[in-house]
Amino acid sequence: MARQTQTKSASKKKKASKMKTTKKKASSAQSKKKATPKPAPKLGLSNELLLQMHRLMVKSRALEERLIKIYKTGEAFFWIGGPGEEAYGVPLGLLANKGQGPKHDYFHLHYRCTPTMVALGMPMIDSIRLIMNRSTDTSTGGRNFSNHYCYPEWNVVPVGSPIEVQYQMAIGTAHVQKRHKAGAVTIVTGGDAGSAEGDFASCLVWASRPANPLPILITVQNNGWGISTDYDGQHGETSITDRGKAFNMRTRVINGNDPIESYIALQEEMEYIRKEQKPVLLEAKVSRLYGHSSASGANFVQNEDCCINMFEERLMRAGLLTEDDASQIKAEYEAEARAAQEQVRLEPSPQKETLWDHVYTDGENGDWRKF
Amino acid sequence: MANMAQAIRMALHFGETKLEVKDVFGQDTGPPLGGVFTATQGVECAWNTPLDERGIVGMALGIGLTGERCVAEIQFADYIFNTIDLLKIAGNTLWTSHGNYPMPIVLMTPVGAGIRGSVYHSHSFDAWATRLPGWKVVIPSNPLDAYGLMLSAIEDPNPVMFLKPKALLRVRGEELIPGEPDDEKKLKSMIDAPLGDRSKWKPKWPKVEDYRVEIGKGKIVHEGTDATVVTYGRHVLMCKDVAEKYAQKGKSIEVIDLRSLYPYDWQMIKSSIQKTGRVLFVNEDTEVTNFAEHLVYRCTQELFYELMARPRVLAAKNLPGIGLPAELEENTVPQKRDIERELDELLAEIP
């Protein structure tokens, strides 16, 4: 939880050591079929919240794995998503002031934010309609890639494919929120590789001007990769948050594979932004469990930490969860995702008659042939 | 009479007081300067941004996502090119979000040559702008149209690109804006900031009234029957002058001021060509993949058998830039003599 910066090598060593510990503990946990009930150690959050986060993390993972299956069975053209980022994404969604308009938080998400959407309350079937490009998809009308969500009722603005443009647009919603003085926050997410784009630097400039600082939670989900290029091939800075320090911005690095640390850190930083109306740059170290996208195979990556496995071990040690519970929850969400896919199969695809819909508002013609 | 910069200023004032514009911003658009062409001078909600075009467009997009109204400025169109993908996003947000998120923004930028602006203050953007689906694109040729188009742009729920012909920003109109004082000196004393210390200056706005120019509607600025000239922006004035000269020679030239490039007034173009059988398209963007080429294509597809001569495009030479000396600039972008040459050929052609 402590604010920290790490060197690349220190981070790697810590990660490697944690992986070994995790594997050891995992095998130990597997050897016990039933957890012995005992008083819960103080994990820093209420038991109800911990179990809620766990369920949402499992739900998000089950959904993403279903999306991958849908792609692999030829029922979608492409998959990109965020399995491995649940421990960070779920708290982010839970902590939001959810609603529509400038008095609520705005989300400028990128395409790895299924966990946040699930935490906000997105039904699984919505995501499946999107990846299967059905006309029933409310985010894009079946027009765009998986994970390109859009929910105006929750201020989730359209997710785009160009890297990092969301950081550039986030300053605008934050500017309006500040005018409305309701303590609302603009949340923008992206990857570590994307922070090389000028739009990321531009966001830091605009958000931190002393004459008009903006209430933005600028986040970077650092999975250590930009498609196939590793961190050292892209970054000279020790930590991405170091760039915020040049702008006198409050910064923080967290272990995004730890949902408890993530929740507490996000809560503190969001409270700071709501109160001070100033930006925070937060970097969460996360895993990328199925590679970049379907273009790189979308296969499970063995040497990355799994935040759900680690969290379940902690919950089991604390006596809050049993292996049976965990299996049951997983099975429940896998069944829900499968059933949703079966329903979506029966739903229609967009038709050519809708091509010109929404070029302009209110059905105004955008086709020059009809001018 | 107001000049175009004053007209835009008054439109923005009307916008902030009557049409819920909350932000007018760009480089140097706020006090003390009020824009390098003074088009935002005295506007209460105008503020200065960092020197960052992508940030300006991004800010506009973010404001647009909240549904609030803003007018952003890129100081010269020459510097808009690094925002092109954000402009694409502005145009596709409604479409890709299945109608969930309209993008009610106005982006204005000075375009074109004519002020000895050299390589990086002379670019046109009209052809590029028309290749951004989802946007509406307007370009006025006089102060009254600038006023009316700006009010329409502000109220339009879609993104509108407002191209300002920079050579016309100091040109006075022939028609008063409703509510504008008759005396241009009086207007100047009311809304032009003084030289020197402006820290205590505030404009005294005339009670300008609502006046709209519908986006998508052109205007016949000179009626004629022998040939049609379709143009916009600063070349409207040149083409009108040429048409008046030809009238003295007994040739009747119809000049259409397109005013909107997208959507464009095809019905006006079509009915004029059906009357004259001859058409010349004039603008100052570079000639290859020029917007007028689309219009010529449409002419040949829909009006081929009604044409008495090959349709022509007169545009700037396809050069990487516009050289500073008059000799270079005037031989790059169309001048009156070029319009006359093309018209002579057009009128002389025998089918």
Image (tube, grey):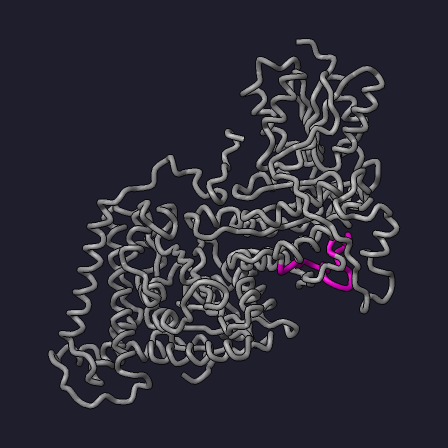
Q: Is residue A20 above or below residue A327?
A: below
Seen at 57% across and 25% down, the residue is B297
Q: Position of residue B164 (x, y in %)?
A: 71, 45
Whether the magenta-drawn stretch holds residue B113 is answered as: no
Q: Is residue B145 above or below residue B192?
A: above
Quadrant where the image shows the C terminus of chain B = top right
Whether the magenta-drawn stretch holds residue B32 is answered as: yes
Q: Place residue A39 in its image quadrant.
A: bottom left
Seen at 33% across and 68% down, the residue is A119
Q: Is residue B290 above or below residue A1?
A: above
In the displayed structure image, the side of residue B295 where residue B328 appears, left or right = right
Q: Place residue B63 in its image quadrant.
A: bottom right
Q: Position of residue B5 (x, y in %)?
A: 76, 49
Whether residue A325 is visible here, answered yes or no, is: yes
Nearest to the observer: residue B216 or residue A285: B216
The secondary structure that most of the magenta stretch takes on is: loop
Range of residues picked out in magenta: B22-40
In the displayed structure image, the side of residue A176 where residue B171 appears, left or right = right
Q: Position of residue B308 (x, y in %)?
A: 65, 13
Nearest to the observer: residue A302 or residue B205: B205
In the displayed structure image, the side of residue B69 where residue A281 appears, left or right = left
Nearest to the observer: residue A344 or residue B257: B257
Nearest to the observer: residue A144 or residue B119: A144
